[in-house]
Image: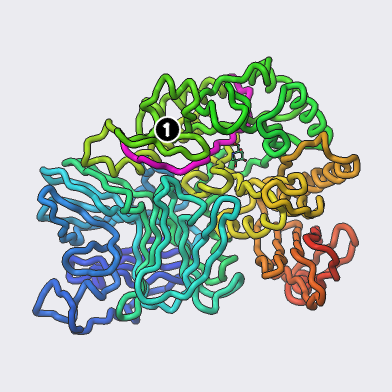
């Protein structure tokens, strides 16, 4: 791994065993993109820049009409003078002028990857970082473009620090994190889109002339679009071909877009969504953007996922949880909703313990008058009628049974019908003279305010200081409205969306550092804020409020493009399923849920003796394979087709697990062989049930016959030991 600057050629080359990223300085001023792809042993500009005198071009120097920033591949850009493509940054000065002229001013290789003030970022072990500085001399503005290279990973991460060294305040209207110009537009565009209970659907469309864009303006990264965008070669599929994926380590409003311009090149750009953003930069202030990850795969989408999974496991999630096995849990939500009493909970917990469950999680409904979802958010005092011995009393009894104890919170919210609201009516986001819009009968606390952040930190201190709680589910069930306040002046109102996210990160940073061994599960009505920003603090996310096993194969497949199974909460729930009314076999519910962070979310008391026996077996099975599932490699063998058939592979150096889910039964079931593709070609594998032995190459390439399956939603799991 190395970063070099070739003075003669004026080229930066960031290179590890997997990739090269190359930039040049043209005319001593302009930072130009030259190459991103498989590692190059050396580079002598065989892909020369195309310098053509074209009509309607803008030129910095009229004596050289072939040189135009409107057509050159750039590393960053603005609008207003030389380039008309989508900008990565935009300043406005006090006169309202938007033109700047940033030029190359120098570079340094940093001794270590800088932490991003107030923002989550990838850790610095085994990395090298290049910082290139550009300067606008007229207004004394600077920007530092940072590029980090990771050992053995086909990743470049980028972020920018925008700095005002002038004497007047300026406004950052656009503060992009990353922009790359690729010489071709012959790609498909991939994004992950969805809705509540229908998250992470992969969409694939051909790039076309103009701008294709996804974004969020909801205050969170959102289930509508994940902060992810990829360009894939037309022939690229799960297992082969080039895919360039980008993700933003950010949990608020973002934009990810690509422009196919007039001569057939494409510009990829990503950052905070400028529609809901502006930042006032006073003299000597700087603004740090979220980090963006650029991931280059030559091994198709599975290759892309492998890199994201490894990167996030090693460089993103809290250190303590990187290799820490996750407990099997019972969550009370779908089994109890708001109605429970300590006596019943203890009966459920006892039964859960008998079945082999390890963590008992009390979901919504445990505090104040929270008997339905219209009230009491913010009043985080225990409901004595339901829990006469308080949280610590309940936790103690659960602990005495040999179980861990977890508790639900929705800290960012306040119900109008709450004591907190009557004490602090000014705490929710709001604008004078306009009604406060409710969602699920609740309002959003203005987390941009330090006082409110401190209030939340104090709540968690109160609950976590005694060590009674081992797990917190951090929920967030509506998006932001009336984003404004009377604290900041009129010219800083557009800072509030971002300040909200910074406030949230401050709270999370403080409490997760203070209580590193508490397992935090991220949730926003399921996977509504499943992004790498949140994962920096909470190593797992409840992937969807839709717990139907058939729907879950699609949703978990979708999230698996970015996150490994160990980051995905998945539970066996009751049938008919509470979200879609579907009846699926318990075996399939088990197989699908154990392909993530396994748990149950049903009323154990209502299960038949036969079902309880099967649950016990599922739990024992999962415990036996936990290390493989949670820390092995994960591959998609079959992504859900029109009948919903789906197959996943978990593999490590010792064993492998294939989970096949058939979806809808078909009258004339086609002949199909399931190829494991990623087992060790040189090894032999024994089916641990039938004891049959096959070579890895045979399983990979000849594949196993998918048996005739009658009935909908059947599934099977096959476990192999490497011998
Ligand atoms: C939404 C979550 O996704 C559910 O799992 C549950 O915790 C409810 N909120 C509780 O209100």
Q: Position of residue 236 (x, y in %)?
A: 55, 75
**Foreground pick, 633 / 493:** 493
Residue 468 forms part of the magenta stretch: yes
Residue drawn at point x = 16 percent, y = 75 percent = 58
**Which quarter of the rendering shows the N terminus?**
bottom left
**Horizontal and vertical percent position of residue 349:** 77, 29
Q: For this rendering, which residue is in front, 537 or 489? A: 489
Residue at 61% x, 31% y: name it: 372
One can see residue 685 in this view: yes
- Which span of residues is magenta-colored? 466-484
Q: Which quarter of the picture shows residue 292?
A: bottom left
Q: Is residue 249 left or right of residue 586?
A: left
Ligand 1 visible in quadrant? top right
**Displayed quadrant of residue 346:** top right
Rendering colour mode: rainbow
Mark 1 surroundings within 10 Å by alpha-carbon count, few (fewer than 14), some (14 through 19), many (20 or more): many
Q: Which residue is mark 1?
A: 445
186 and 585: which is toward the camera: 585
Q: Describe residue 234's horizontal placement relative to residue 662 as left or right.
A: left
Looking at the picture, how far across and down is residue 243, in whole percent? 50, 70
Residue at coordinates 62% horizontally, 27% vertically from top-left? 371
Magenta-colored segment: predominant secondary structure? loop
In this rendering, the answer to whether 451 lies above or below 281 is above
Can residue 21 be seen here? The reply is no
659 relative position to 686: left or right: left
Q: Position of residue 163 (x, y in %)?
A: 22, 47
At x 83%, y 63%, the residue is 711
Residue 692 on the magenta segment:
no
């Amino acid at each position: 791994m190395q970063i070099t600057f070739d003075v003669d050629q004026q080229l930066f080359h960031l290179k590890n065993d997997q990739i090269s990223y190359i930039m040049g300085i043209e005319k001593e001023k302009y930072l130009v993109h030259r190459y991103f792809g498989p590692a190059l042993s050396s580079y002598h500009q065989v892909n020369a820049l195309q310098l053509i005198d074209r009509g309607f071009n803008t030129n910095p120097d009229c004596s050289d009409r072939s040189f135009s920033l409107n057509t050159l591949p750039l590393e960053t850009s603005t609008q207003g003078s030389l380039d008309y493509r989508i900008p990565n940054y935009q300043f406005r000065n006090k006169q309202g002028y938007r033109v700047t002229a940033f030029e190359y001013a120098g570079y340094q290789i940093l001794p270590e990857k800088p932490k991003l003030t107030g923002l989550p970022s990838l850790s610095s072990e085994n990395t090298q970082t290049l910082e290139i500085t550009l300067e606008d001399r007229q207004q004394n503005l600077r920007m530092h473009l940072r590029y980090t290279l990771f050992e053995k990973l086909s990743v470049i991460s980028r972020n920018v620090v925008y700095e005002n060294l002038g004497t007047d305040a300026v406004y950052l209207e656009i503060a992009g994190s990353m922009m790359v110009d690729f010489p071709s537009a012959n790609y498909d565009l991939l994004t992950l889109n969805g809705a509540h209970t229908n998250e992470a659907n992969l969409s694939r469309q051909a790039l076309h002339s103009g701008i294709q864009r996804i974004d969020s303006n909801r205050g969170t990264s959102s289930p509508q679009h994940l902060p992810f965008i990829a360009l894939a070669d037309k022939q690229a599929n799960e297992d082969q071909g080039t895919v360039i994926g980008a993700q933003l380590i950010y949990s608020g409003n973002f934009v990810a877009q690509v422009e196919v311009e007039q001569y057939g090149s494409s510009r990829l750009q990503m950052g905070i969504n400028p529609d809901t953003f502006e930042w006032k930069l006073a003299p000597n202030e700087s603004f740090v953007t979220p980090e963006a990850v650029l991931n280059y795969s030559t091994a198709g989408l599975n290759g892309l996922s492998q890199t994201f999974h490894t990167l996030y496991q090693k460089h993103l999630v809290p250190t303590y949880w990187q290799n820490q096995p996750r407990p099997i849990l019972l969550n009370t939500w779908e089994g109890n909703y708001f109605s429970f009493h300590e006596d019943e909970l203890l009966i459920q917990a006892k039964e859960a313990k008998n079945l082999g469950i390890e963590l008992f999680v009390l979901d919504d409904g445990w505090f104040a008058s929270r008997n339905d979802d219209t009230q009491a958010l913010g009043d985080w005092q225990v409901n004595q009628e339901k829990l006469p011995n308080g949280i610590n009393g309940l936790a103690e009894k659960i602990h005495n049974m040999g179980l861990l104890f977890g508790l639900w919170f929705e800290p960012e919210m306040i119900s109008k019908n709450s004591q907190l609201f009557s004490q602090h009516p000014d705490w929710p986001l709001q604008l004078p003279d306009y009604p406060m819009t409710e969602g699920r009968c609740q309002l959003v606390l203005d987390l941009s305010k330090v006082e409110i952040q401190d209030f939340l930190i104090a709540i968690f201190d109160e609950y976590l200081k005694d060590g009674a709680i081992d797990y917190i589910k951090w929920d967030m069930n509506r998006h932001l409205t009336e984003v404004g306040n009377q604290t900041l002046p009129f010219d800083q109102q557009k800072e509030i969306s971002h300040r909200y996210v910074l406030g949230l990160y401050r709270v999370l940073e403080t409490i997760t550092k203070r209580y590193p061994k508490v397992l935090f599960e991220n949730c926003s009505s399921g996977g509504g804020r499943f992004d790498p920003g949140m994962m920096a603090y909470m190593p797992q996310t409840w992937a969807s409020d839709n717990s139907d096993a058939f729907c879950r194969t699609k949703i978990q497949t979708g999230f698996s493009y970015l996150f490994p199974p160990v980051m995905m909460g998945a539970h066996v729930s009751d049938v008919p399923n509470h979200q879609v009314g579907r009846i699926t076999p318990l075996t399939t519910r088990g197989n699908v849920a154990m392909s993530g962070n396994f748990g149950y979310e049903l009323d154990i008391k209502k299960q038949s003796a036969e079902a309880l026996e099967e649950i016990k077996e599922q739990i024992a099975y999962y415990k036996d394979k936990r290390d493989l599932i949670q820390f092995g490699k994960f591959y998609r063998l079959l992504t859900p087709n029109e009948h919903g058939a789906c197959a996943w592979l978990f593999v490590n150096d010792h064993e492998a697990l294939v989970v096949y889910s058939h979806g809808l039964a078909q009258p004339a079931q086609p002949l199909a062989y399931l190829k494991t593709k990623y087992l060790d070609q040189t090894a032999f594998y024994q089916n641990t049930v039938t004891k049959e032995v096959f070579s890895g190459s045979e399983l990979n390439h000849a594949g196993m016959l998918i048996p005739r399956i009658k009935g909908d939603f059947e599934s099977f799991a096959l476990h192999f030991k490497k011998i």
